[in-house]
Amino acid sequence: MKADFSRAAASYDEAAVLARETGRRMAQRLDYVKIAPRRIADVGCATGDGIRELQRRYPAALPLAVDYARPMLAAVKARTALFSRIAGRAPRLVNADARRLPLADGALGLAWSNLMLHWLDDPLPALRELHRVLEVGGLLMFSMLGPDTLKELRAAGAPALRAFHDMHDLGDMLVAAGFADAVMDMEMVEFAYASPRGLLRDQRLLGVRDGMLGAMDFRTARRVLRAWATQRRAGRLPATFEVVYGHAWKAAPNLAADGRAIVRFRQP
């Protein structure tokens, strides 16, 4: 999918309605979190809405925009105000895979990832890597698509629709990655399209059509889209996206590097 994301950099903003909305709702959750991170990163930053929001909230923090598609990082740079560049406040651009971040252990106070981790067949290695690069007391905040995404197309018989991880499985992955105090919730966001072409266009502009819908020959696609058309409500085609939100903290370790237990004593 890397080539698809790279090609979509110029068209991404035109169709990124869901990403903007989930990013806004993620940011609202930060209203209730008291942190003052020294370094922040938007991992899977696309064109940079997330890192710009984090910069607004944490102006003293060093901002990192991380993406494995170089054209997306070029779009972040192009959308950075000239004053920010002159003042040295432009995000640092990091071309990297979320599973292999070129960051030191404990480098970040806040790691943010909006609608990216679900494109990994197995998010656990990325979650472990995010745990590694967070400092003790650092926060991971993310959103991902859940298994009921495009349930209408699944009901219509789409044979290769991408399968997404359940919220409870993601919670288990956070624990396995070493995170503590994980909080998960989800919501259903429904779009309505006048015709199948609208959904196909949006997915193409985002660079995820093949990754989301899978390969379908012409005959199969026609059959699926006809079946979807029978689900019209008020003349519109429903398209549901299940959005899973999560945040978790990096707690102090209980074991030393050599395997010995760490016991902490506190004065009363």
Image (spheres, rainbow, N blue to C red):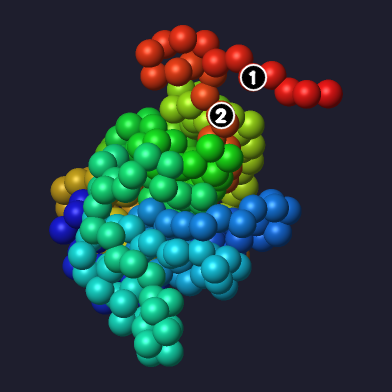
Instruction: Mark 1 or mark 2: name the one nearer the start of the chain.
Output: 2
Secondary structure found at label 2 = loop
For the C terminus, give its image quadrant: top right
Look at the image and tell me whether residue 255 can be seen: yes
Circle 2 Cα neighbour tier, 10 Å, few/some/many (<14 / 14–19 / ≥20): few
Measured from the top left, where is residue 207 in percent x and y? 27, 61
Look at the image and tell me whether residue 203 can be seen: no
Q: Residue furthest right?
A: 268
Measured from the top left, where is residue 153 in percent x and y? 40, 46
User: Dot 1 corresponds to which residue?
Assistant: 264
Circle 1 Cα neighbour tier, 10 Å, few/some/many (<14 / 14–19 / ≥20): few
Quarter of the image where one finds residue 8: bottom left
Location of residue 138 with respect to 174 vertically, above or below: below
Location of residue 67 with respect to 151 vertically, above or below: below
Q: Residue furthest top?
A: 260
Measured from the top left, where is residue 121 in percent x and y? 30, 35
Residue type beneath disc 1: Arg
Identified at 53% across, 37% down, the residue is 136
Identified at 38% across, 54% down, the residue is 43
The front one of 207 and 200 is 207
Q: Residue furthest front?
A: 267
Callout 1–callout 2 Cβ contact below 8 Å: yes
Identified at 69% across, 51% down, the residue is 33
User: Dot 2 corresponds to which residue?
Assistant: 252
**Would residue 11 appear left or right of 195 to someone viewing this image?**
left
Quarter of the image where one finds residue 266: top right
In this view, the mark in front (1 or 2): 1
The front one of 143 and 93 is 93
Q: CA gap, disc 1 to disc 2? A: 10 Å
